[in-house]
Amino acid sequence: MGPIGFKELVVILIVVLVIFGAKKLKTIGSDLGSAVRGFKKSMNEGDQEESVKQLKADAEFSESSSKTTEKSEHKA
């Protein structure tokens, strides 16, 4: 059994259209689109949160390393 071709996709689309109807199919499509948009938005927000956490961690590390350097200069 090979990959699904154009003819098979057309048959599947016609069967789905007959089963659900045009109005219901439109609603299903818009619901699916909003779900995909929501998923992408949450993924992007997660990436942004990780970036902010990494920047804060880098800033804290640079502050602590500069304080350590200042203390060692004062001892010498």
Image (tube, rainbow, N blue to C red):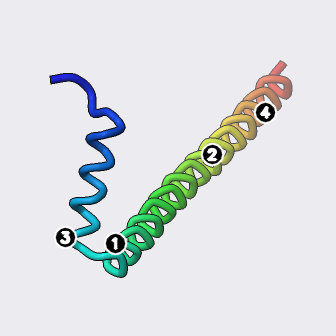
Residue that lies at the very extreme toward the left in this rendered image? 1
Residue closest to the eye, 10 or 34? 10
**Image quadrant assignment for residue 23:** bottom left
- State which tag comes first along the sequence, 3 or 2: 3
- Report the mark closest to the observer, 2 or 4: 2
Give the residue drawn at x 32%, y 33%: 5
Label 1 sits on what residue type?
Answer: Leu
Real-space Cα separation, disc 2 to disc 4, in angstroms: 23 Å
- Report the mark closest to the observer, 3 or 2: 3
Label number found at residue 51? 2
Label 2 sits on what residue type?
Answer: Ser
- State which tag comes first along the sequence, 3 or 1: 3
CB atoms of marks 3 and 2 within 8 Å: no
Tell whether 22 sits left or right of 46: left
- State which tag comes first along the sequence, 3 or 4: 3
CB atoms of marks 1 and 4 within 8 Å: no
- Report the mark closest to the observer, 1 or 2: 1
Residue closest to the eye, 59 or 64? 59
Give the residue drawn at x 24%, y 62%: 16
- State which tag comes first along the sequence, 1 or 4: 1
Label 3 sits on what residue type?
Answer: Ile
Total numbered circles: 4
Label number found at residue 42? none
SS class of the residue under badge 4? helix
Identify the residue under disc 4.
Answer: 66
Q: Is residue 20 above or below residue 73?
A: below
Identify the residue under disc 1.
Answer: 25
Q: Is residue 43 above or below residue 19?
A: above
Label 4 sits on what residue type?
Answer: Ser
Return the x and y of residue 38 as percentages of the image width and height.
48, 65
